[in-house]
Image (cartoon, rainbow, N blue to C red):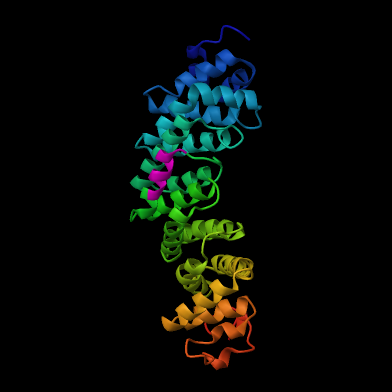
Amino acid sequence: MGGVSTDKIRELILSWQMMDAVELSRGSEEALLALIDLAREEDRTTKMRALAALGEVLKGTDRKTKSLILKNGFDAIVEALNEGDERLNMRALGVLKRLVGETPLGKKQLVDLVDALASLVSRGEGLAWLEAVELAAKISVPSPPDGVLSRMASLLNSPNLHGKALALRLLLNMGQPSSENWGLILRGTAELLRSGNPLLVEAALDALADILKLPSTAPMEGVLREILPVLKELTKTADNLVLRARAREVLGLLEGALYSYYRSRPGEARNVVKKFLNAGLIDEAMILALVVGDSSLLLGVDGEMQPPDVLGRTFDKLPGSPRGP
């Protein structure tokens, strides 16, 4: 269908006939490009309507159309994330959630998107950060450029908890956590779990579940030290039953991850248990010994069993366990 002007598309999206513009854009490259141009306009109403129409175009569309929007409109959509208007931010995030994932991003596109998302969450505006985290869950890049990794490390090191949640999700979608960022990931996750904000806690639990499902090559001592205590506490004190149930579910994944990691590393398990006993971290030492099924790990440095009252007990009966007395 030829002869579709930008003015015609503008007229449609600013009236009650937006779906007519959507149908035109699905069937005509010229109409789609005109719609993309409208997403660049300074007028906020026009830009918002154009983004809403693009979101409708992307519902159930083919890869060719997605590629066309990615090539010609990605910069305009990402730029809308820098606007100080939460409604506009949310529109742009909705479009991007439908656009990325199946359609691979170029290096510059990825850097620009991560920068825009980082800037967005740093402003802490409403619930846009939650949409940003959901968008981040759809971005999968096996080998992210250095600029992206350094940006995420900066977010994990910042005091901004919303930024930590975003960086955590992005890192998990970019391959196995490396030894360089493992400590940052664990500390950031623990901070989110302790935040008292149900949405941040839920985001952290979801990320932690994904971490614990990965075949870990990074030392699990940090998981025991940083994550286990706060996770156990959440099973008893989280704001609602849903979060408590989710915390218990993730605690089960943690048990499985510990067993998978330490069953082939008995020497490392023994060293960690001794380190915990010497540091007074009795619960953590007991849990590790019981998870790997070897109570002899509780032999202290002086050769005596410490503490004897836990022998024969199971993980769910440990002091402080969510399933214990």
Task: State the image quarter where residue 16 is shown.
Answer: top right
In the rendered structure, the answer to whether residue 65 lies left or right of residue 225 reads right
Residue at image position (41%, 32%) is 80
In the rendered structure, the answer to whether residue 1 lies left or right of residue 221 reads right
The residue sitting at the top extreme is: 3
Residue at image position (54%, 27%) is 53
Residue 19 seen in the current view: no
Q: Position of residue 25 (x, y in %)?
A: 59, 19
Q: Is residue 150 magenta?
A: yes
Task: State the image quarter where residue 290 is shown.
Answer: bottom right
Residue at image position (52%, 23%) is 71
| Vertical side of 237 occupied by 54: above or below | above
Count of marks placed on residues: 0
Residue at image position (62%, 32%) is 59
| Vertical side of 141 occupied by 325: above or below | below
Between 220 and 99, which is closer to the camera in this rendering? 220
Between 67 and 22, which is closer to the camera in this rendering? 67
Q: Which residues are magenta?
A: 145-153
Q: Quadrant of the N terminus?
A: top right
Q: Main secondary structure of the magenta part?
A: helix
Between 239 and 303, which is closer to the camera in this rendering? 303
Q: Position of residue 242 (x, y in %)?
A: 57, 65
